[in-house]
Amino acid sequence: MTLVYGAYTLLDAQNPSVYCYLRELNGRKLLVLLNFTALPVTAQTGLDLSKAKVLLGNYPAPALDGRLKPYEAVILDLG
């Protein structure tokens, strides 16, 4: 529900290599991080990711600090 109906906030809008946004609904926050390039990139979310839980990712071990591998996609539950 949160991913579809949650309030949308675009993050790191000036970074042309990533698309990242936050969805919030009923106190739950989901962070979506997408790297559309063949190079590693870092998304500047401005959020505390220390307690984030990986819900979905296309790499076996996604980083929890905004660093994304080439063409990485990850959804993090921030609570």
Image: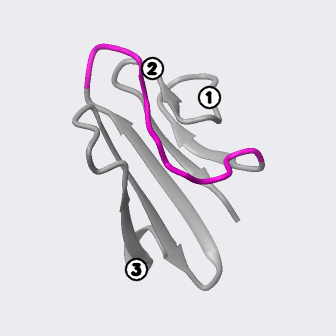
Residues in magenta?
37-50
Q: Residue at x 47, y 29 (%)?
A: 58
Dot 2 alpha-carbon crowd within 10 angstroms: few under 14, some 14 to 19, many 20 or more:
many
* Residue picked out by circle 3: 5
* Secondary structure at numbered mark 3: helix
* Residue picked out by circle 2: 69
Residue 44 at x, y = what percent? 47, 42
In the picture, residue 15 is in which quadrant? Answer: top left
Applied colour scheme: one colour
Between circles 3 and 2, the one closer to the viewer is: 2
Q: Residue at x 63, y 73 (%)?
A: 28
Q: Are marks 3 and 1 in contact (CB under 8 Å)?
A: no
Using the image as rendered, state which of residue 32 and residue 43 is in the foreground: 43
Between circles 3 and 1, the one closer to the viewer is: 1
- Residue 48: in magenta span: yes
Quick one: label 3 or label 1, which is nearer the N terminus?
Answer: 3
* Residue picked out by circle 1: 63
Gap in angstroms between the C-alphas marked 3 and 1: 26 Å
Q: Amino acid at mark 2?
A: Lys
Q: Amino acid at mark 3?
A: Tyr
Residue 38 at x, y = what percent? 28, 14
Report the residue that reaches farthest toward the right: 51
Q: Amino acid at mark 1?
A: Ala
Q: Residue at x 54, y 43 (%)?
A: 56
Quadrant including the C terminus:
bottom right
Using the image as rendered, state which of residue 3 and residue 63 is in the foreground: 63
Which SS type dominates the magenta stretch? loop
